[in-house]
Amino acid sequence: MIIPGYEQTAVDPRAALEARFEVEAFHARYCHTLDTGDLVNWVDFFDEACTYVVTGRENAEAGLPVGLIYAEGRGMIRDRAYAVKHTQMYAPRYMMHMVSNVLVLRASTEEIRSVSNYLLLQTLVEGRTTIHQAGRYYDTFVRSAGSLLIRERRCVYDSDLIANDLVFPV
Amino acid sequence: MFSTTDTVIHPLGAATKEREPAEYVWPAAGLTEVPDWIYTSQVIYDREVERIFHGRTWNYVALEAEIPKANDFVRSWIGPTPVVVARDADGSIHVFENRCAHRGVEFCRHSRGNNAEFVCPYHQWSYDMRGNLQGVPFRRGMKGEADSGMPRDFNPAQHGLRKMNVATRHGVVFASFAADMEPLEAYLGEEITHDFDVLFKGRQLRILGYYRNELPGNWKLYHENLKDPYHATLLHSFLVTFGLMVAGSKSAMIADPSGRHGTMASAKPADVTKVVDASTASQMRAYRTDLKLEDPRFIDFVPEFESPWTVTMQTIWPNLIVQRELNTLGVRQIVPNGPNSMIMNWTMFGFDTDTEEMTRHRLRQGNLMGPAGFLGLEDNEAIKFLQEGVRRSPTDIGILKLGGTTEGTATTLVTESAIRSMYRHYREVMGL
Ligand code: FES
Ligand SMILES: [Fe+2]
């Protein structure tokens, strides 16, 4: 599925390779942070003017804007991090992200656009591990002080029927 | 039907709670006690499908905004039964079983779409948008071959899809297995109709999108949850801390005269610290003075309705929730999925008159609700925990004693009276 703004453009192969390494390194740090339950530092992966949306594929394909999580700006990211960590009631669980097939769609000195596949595994402490979501990250990164920050991340999941709820961010 | 989760079952759990039909007897204490088996028994579940979902009820099936044009359709459910909601060329809306009249194939596989006819993929019987059988390939058989094709007396008019009774109100479509249902307004009653109309009357909806989740709990628990204002003020930090529904603020739990429908209503105070005194605060762990928002826009309320309430959550028996939570609006369809599970289909919307900023406000506020919402996920977890408790423990009774034995509408949040009303109605219909 291609969502507007995430079409493949002509990218110099060497630039694409370098951008891919950068994006892969970003994913590794981002997922490690979330998978270790570190919501405080998760906030720092986002640019001040970011958009972060988690939505089903049906919505994305139909151009429907709703998000299971819908954040405009880092303030809303921080509010979610605080709420999930300190105020929400849910059963204990572990999450694990697996990210692959990083495809660079656009790369310049200021911005990288890419799409990557993700699997989100959930382990409720008393149950077996399940695939909670199979989806794609549609990412726009900007550079800040030598590293990448998320300007836009759209997490579009194929797994339409959610098992009860989504507690932690994707 | 569906399953996304495995629930761990105690070896003495579900099995011990199944019994002979005659042994399903409601506790002598009456409505202040609820037996666990209404949540776990397959026998009871089957009776619910027959007497409630397939009985004398109006079931939500779709919004007209999803099928604005001729030949539009959506796939839907009445109880666990798959149906199709279709708009014919003349604009009329029809609801019929999603089950081929030939061999029973669930022929419609797309959530929504547009076509002038439905063709069953197995042997290509075709149906019009009203569910009438149009074509049977080789109905007259192969020319010159004996005993080929349908018998001469086969009458397509008698082999259409099973058709449901349909009613609409301000763009919301309901259907019933019962052909002789009372009008929808009479079914809802005056008060429920009033709050329903506050949201829908005179509006053109704009669909913002969908969520779907499986809740590993009995379908009635969702009704109970929204007829249980006691939990609202205890479980949900976001409701309490930001005054969306909090003990001390103006609120009501409205039940219709039949007891089956409800509206949980609340008015957000201008300053929540003025309504929550120290003694109230001390009983609500969820009241969190440390919870401060860096971006408070998402709990803003933009007045847009003629109503004293900023929040109304309506439970419309047996399968609809109407959400007006500040400015985040939506409907939820409950699809029961056996005694221990339900599917929730969420349709979120705004109005066609919304500005770009108003749409974004609704989307931001959507973080309160849905399977990842600050309120929504806590309810889903609580319902799951409740189901596991009633399945796995040999103790067999839950109690409903808040507010004594009162039933019906209440103005206090610390009551279970609307749940008792619902179960009075339920027991009558179920013969329990
Ligand atoms: S089952 Fe549908 S045409 Fe045979
Ligand atoms: Fe709740």
Image (cartoon, coloured by chain):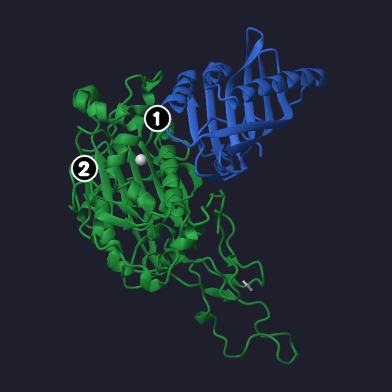
Q: Is mark 1 within 8 Å of ligand 2?
A: no
Q: Residue at x 41, y 57 (%)?
A: B39
Badge 1 crowding class, 10 Å Cα cut-off, few under 14, some 14 to 19, many 20 or more, is some
In the rendered structure, the answer to whether residue B213 lies left or right of residue A121 reads left
In the rendered structure, the answer to whether residue B389 lies left or right of residue B247 reads right
Q: Residue at x 59, y 38 (%)?
A: A123
Determine the quadrant in which ligand 1 lies: bottom right
In the rendered structure, the answer to whether residue A51 lies left or right of residue A1 reads left
Chain corresponding to green in the figure? B
The mark found on residue B252 in the picture is 2
- Chain letter behind tag 1: B
Find numbered disc 1 in the image and state the secondary structure of the residue it sits on. helix
x and y, in percent, of residue A170 in the image = 57, 31
Up-down relation of residue A74 to residue A8 (above or below): above
Q: Amino acid at mark 1?
A: His
- In-front residue for pair A66/B171: A66
Task: For marks 1 and 2, give the one nearer the viewer.
Answer: 2
Determine the image quadrant of residue A34. Answer: top right
Task: Measure the alpha-carbon separation of dots 1 and 2.
Answer: 26 Å
- Residue under circle 1? B361
Q: Colour of chain A?
A: blue
- Chain letter behind tag 2: B
Up-down relation of residue B35 to residue B288 (above or below): below
Query: Is there any visible trace of residue B277 in the rendered image?
Result: no
> Which sits earlier in the primary sequence, circle 1 or circle 2?
2
Q: Amino acid at mark 2?
A: Ala
The lab-note entry on whether marks 1 and 2 share a chain reads yes
x and y, in percent, of residue A3 in the image = 62, 35
